[in-house]
């Protein structure tokens, strides 16, 4: 069963605009959440994370928001740049665990 | 420094054959993970090594799959009697700790195609 869901398989956004990627999870034991970015023919690379004790974490153009009551998180990219075109995976885990549960990914295309 | 490397990058085999996929983790990383990514899906956990021992192999789909890490560095994922459903990208990751808060660094993967 899919414990982490990314319901939008793709997203197209104009350069300079905001990209918003959504992720839902079902396992209430998850308390650590990550976003990974993947370019073709490369492995996923860590982008940003958030612990359940926070509701927001920001790193440059990337901000992750966590709504624990809704079991929902989102990644905002502002402003979007052509180099942001990639597949973005949401992942979740329990803090004292090592296993990551991934969503199916959202393909972001930033149009010039 | 060198990242995680995986060989081969692509492997095509026939149903019923045996395959080995290799992973070279980042030097010094004690934790090593194998994931499998099927078409249209995210990576799914297969097995986790801490040092030389398989600390958790609960994600291996059946006993056709086996992995080793004899010297605590390079790991090999072995698949016996391959089936068409084994076709996927097999990803290896390593980290210098054993918690999810320790960043897992992924290799580029091996794309396995079983004809």
Image: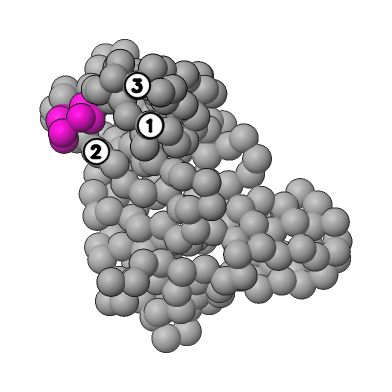
Span highlighted in magenta in the image? A57-64
Q: Is residue A85 above or below residue B103?
A: above
Of A108 and B100, which appears nearest the observer?
A108
Secondary structure at numbered mark 3: loop
The circle drawn on residue A82 is: 1
Q: Is residue B33 above or below residue A56?
A: below
Numbered disc 3: what chain? A
First in sequence: mark 1 or mark 2?
2
Circle 3 Cα neighbour tier, 10 Å, few/some/many (<14 / 14–19 / ≥20): some
The circle drawn on residue A15 is: 3
Numbered disc 1: what chain? A
Q: What residue is pinned by disc 2?
A: A49
Contact check, label 3 and label 1, Cβ < 8 Å: yes
What secondary structure characterizes most of the magenta part? strand
Residue drawn where x is 37% and y is 41% of the image = A36
Numbered disc 2: what chain? A
Of A97 and A18, which appears nearest the observer?
A18
Cα gap from disc 3 to disc 2, whole angstroms = 24 Å
Q: Is residue B65 left or right of residue B108?
A: right
Query: Are the numbered discs 3 and 1 placed on the same chain, yes or no?
Result: yes
Inspect this view and state whether residue A73 appears. no
Cα gap from disc 3 to disc 1, whole angstroms = 7 Å
Query: Are the numbered discs 3 and 2 placed on the same chain, yes or no?
Result: yes
Of A43 and A40, which appears nearest the observer?
A40
Depth check, mark 3 against mark 2: the one in front is 3
First in sequence: mark 3 or mark 1?
3
- On-image quarter of the C terminus of chain A: top left
Residue drawn where x is 16% and y is 35% of the image = A59
């Amino acid at each position: 069963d899919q414990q982490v869901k990314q319901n939008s398989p793709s997203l197209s956004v104009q350069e300079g605009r905001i990209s918003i990627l959504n992720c839902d999870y079902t396992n209430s034991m998850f308390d650590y959440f990550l976003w990974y970015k993947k370019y073709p023919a490369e492995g996923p690379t860590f982008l940003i994370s958030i612990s359940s004790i926070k509701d927001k974490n920001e790193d440059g153009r990337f901000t992750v928001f966590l709504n624990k009551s809704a079991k929902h998180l989102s990644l905002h990219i502002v402003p979007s740049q052509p180099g942001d075109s990639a597949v973005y995976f949401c992942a979740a885990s329990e803090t004292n665990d090592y296993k990551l549960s991934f969503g199916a990914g959202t393909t972001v295309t930033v149009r010039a | 420094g060198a990242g995680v490397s995986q060989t081969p990058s692509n492997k095509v085999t026939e149903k019923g054959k045996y395959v080995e996929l290799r992973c070279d983790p980042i030097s010094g990383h004690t934790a090593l993970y194998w994931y499998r990514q099927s078409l249209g899906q995210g990576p799914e956990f297969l097995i986790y090594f801490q040092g030389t021992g398989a600390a958790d192999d609960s994600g291996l789909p059946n006993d056709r799959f086996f992995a080793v890490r004899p010297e605590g560095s390079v790991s090999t994922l072995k698949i016996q009697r391959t089936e068409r459903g084994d076709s996927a990208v097999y990803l290896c990751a390593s980290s210098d700790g054993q918690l999810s808060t320790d960043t897992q660094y992924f290799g580029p993967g091996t794309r396995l195609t079983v004809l």
